[in-house]
Each structure stands twice: as structure tokens, then as C-alpha cells.
Amino acid sequence: MNNIENHNFVLESVIVKEDDGYYSLCLDVDVASQGDTIEEAKSMLIEAVEGYIEVSVDMGLPFLRPVPDHANPEIIEPENIMERFTIHYKAA
């Protein structure tokens, strides 16, 4: 049994407008994805974050690693943020 089983994580995330679509970023684990629409970018990010956490836990690696300030869109390009949302992840 690992130390995160049955733990619920609430991870802050954003969707950012780019010239040709959107990118999504989970600010708490520094995982990103993209999509042609806001919904696609969000869906792809949720899938990427879940996979990242599962692999990290399986390998015994730390997974919480906040986005550094110099790469955080809330700091460097807040005018392009289209949506803020949370990813709810329950470790099994």
C-alpha cells in the first residue's frame, strides 16, 4: 500500500489561448496538454495528469511539482487565460 491511496487531490489548472488553439496546464504538477477547443484542451489535460500521477506513484517518484513562476501563465500572460478549473483526482 502506498502512502497516497484513498487520497483526494484537487489540482489547480488553466486553459490559455494561443494563436491556433488552446493549451492547458496543471499548475500543481507542471503537466501540459493542448487542443483545438477549450473542452478538448481540458479533457486532454485531465487524461495527461491522471497518467502522470499513476506512473509517478508506481515508480515511487514525487509528483507534486508546481509550475515555476517564469513559466506560470497566471504571472506571465494572465490576459490569455480563458478558464481556471480544478482537476479532482482520487488515488486508488
Image (cartoon, helix red, strand yellow):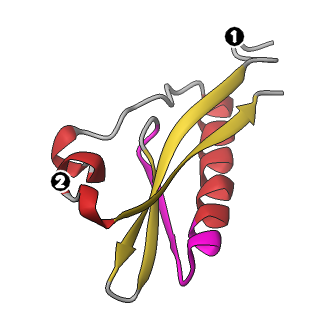
Question: What quarter of the picture does the N terminus occupy?
Answer: top right
* Position in image of residue 21 (x %, y %): 44, 83
Q: Amino acid at mark 1?
A: Asn
* Position in image of residue 24 (x %, y %): 47, 61
In the rendered view, does 59 fall on the left or right side of 76? right
- Residue behind mark 2: 76
* Position in image of residue 39 (x %, y %): 64, 70
Q: Is residue 62 above or below residue 33?
A: above
* Earlier sequence position, callout 1 versus callout 2: 1
In the rendered view, does 75 fall on the left or right side of 89? left
Q: Is residue 81 above or below residue 5?
A: below
The tally of labels here is 2
In the rendered view, does 33 fall on the left or right side of 45? left
- For the residue labelled by badge 1, is the local secondary structure a helix, a strand or a loop? loop
- For the residue labelled by badge 2, is the local secondary structure a helix, a strand or a loop? helix
| Label 1 crowd (10 A; few <14 / some 14-19 / many >=20) | few
> Going 50% across and 65% down the picture, which residue do you hit?
33
Question: What quarter of the picture does the C terminus occupy?
Answer: top right
Q: Is residue 41 above or below residue 26?
A: below
> Going 22% across and 50% down the picture, which residue do you hit?
71
The image quarter in which residue 28 lies: top left
Verify whether residue 26 appears in magenta.
no
Q: Amino acid at mark 2?
A: Ile
In the rendered view, does 81 fall on the left or right side of 90? left
Q: Where does the magenta region start and end?
A: 29-41
**Mark carried by residue 57:** none
- Residue behind mark 1: 3
Looking at the image, is mark 1 or mark 2 nearer the viewer?
A: 2
The image quarter in which residue 4 lies: top right
